[in-house]
Image (spheres, rainbow, N blue to C red):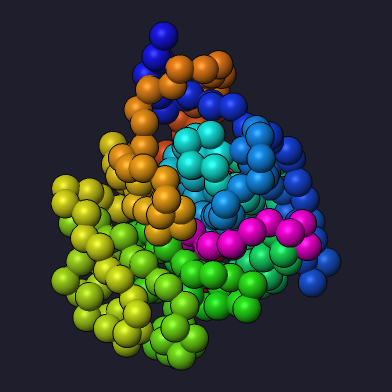
Amino acid sequence: MSTPIRASSILPGRREDIELHTADGLTLVGELARPLEGEPSATLVCLHPLPTHGGMMDSHVFRKAAWRLPALAGLAVLRFNTRGTSSVRGTSEGAFDGAVGERFDVAAAIEYAEFHELPNIWLVGWSFGTDLALKYGCDPAVAGAILLSPPLRYSAPEDLAVWAETGKPLTALVPEFDDYLRPEEAGQRFAAVPQAEVVGVDGAKHLWVGDAEKVLDEIVRRVAPDVPLPLPTTWDGPMETGDVSAYADRTVAAFADTPVPGPAQRRAE
């Protein structure tokens, strides 16, 4: 009997808590989710929204990716808390550094994926995480990047120039009603990267509430093009249920007006 896949649904997969070790001596907490059987066809390294305002490895799109995509699309999903960030998984060492020290966090995640021979590594950044992908993610081990709600706040034209020079695939999913960068302006800003694809998503907003399924379909379309789309909305096998109430006070994300509870973190200037 088919069961609807809901926000709290956890489909079968191999999930393990992991630690990343940065070049400047910090330990970051994370999780790696892989298909239950066989090897993944590609790997998503998730870079979360602004941690001072609720962004974390469990931000809802990334949580759903980790809970669904190993089973539905045969993907590995690596998500982690950047320095000073807390979630149910725990708190990473260090403090928020305004996209400066986080360069070591991105490098540690890519290094982990490469060392563990995870295939076809793609970065998936969301909001603040898109700036980290643009600034620090154009690594030889990375196949390409997908940007969700890119504000282009911390990244600079020279970062786009690096991506343009490499020719690596770069896709920006831009909500029609984004708070910071909407599709028309995004098209103009990303024109500096000839291979960049800007996809406007009708009706969507910065936080992708109600649109996570569209986002997951678009991610899979690019990293695993052989997987039929749209992804299934029901599941015939065993399914667990996650406790989404644990995230009730963390539903805001990048640049929201009200900071969330959590460890003291230094705000970017």
Q: Which quarter of the image is occupied by the N terminus?
A: top left
In the displayed structure image, the side of residue 201 where residue 260 appears, left or right:
right
Percent x, y for residue 154?
45, 75
Q: Residue furthest right?
A: 25
Percent x, y for residue 122?
53, 62
Residue 119 image-quadrant placement: bottom right
39, above or below 14, in the image: below
Residue 171 image-quadrant placement: bottom left
Instruction: Mark yes or no: residue 113 visible.
Output: yes
In the displayed structure image, the side of residue 23 where residue 14 appears, left or right:
left
Q: Which residues are magenta?
A: 115-129
On whether residue 116 falls in the magenta region, the answer is yes
57, above or below 139, in the image: above
Q: Nearer the viewer, residue 95 or 92?
A: 92
Percent x, y for residue 96?
61, 62
167, above or below 177, in the image: below
Q: Please tell me how many numbered marks the rendered image carries.
A: 0
Instruction: Give the residue at x 22% y 75%.
Output: 187
On whether residue 124 falls in the magenta region, the answer is yes
Instruction: Give the residue at x 47% y 77%.
Output: 168
In the displayed structure image, the side of residue 163 where residue 171 appears, left or right:
left
Q: Residue furthest front?
A: 226
Instruction: Give the residue at x 16% y 71%.
Output: 184
Percent x, y for residue 245?
49, 24
Q: Residue furthest top?
A: 1
Q: Nearer the viewer, residue 252 or 211?
A: 211
Instruction: Mark yes or no: residue 66 visible.
Output: no
Instruction: Give the residue at x 25% y 50%.
Output: 205
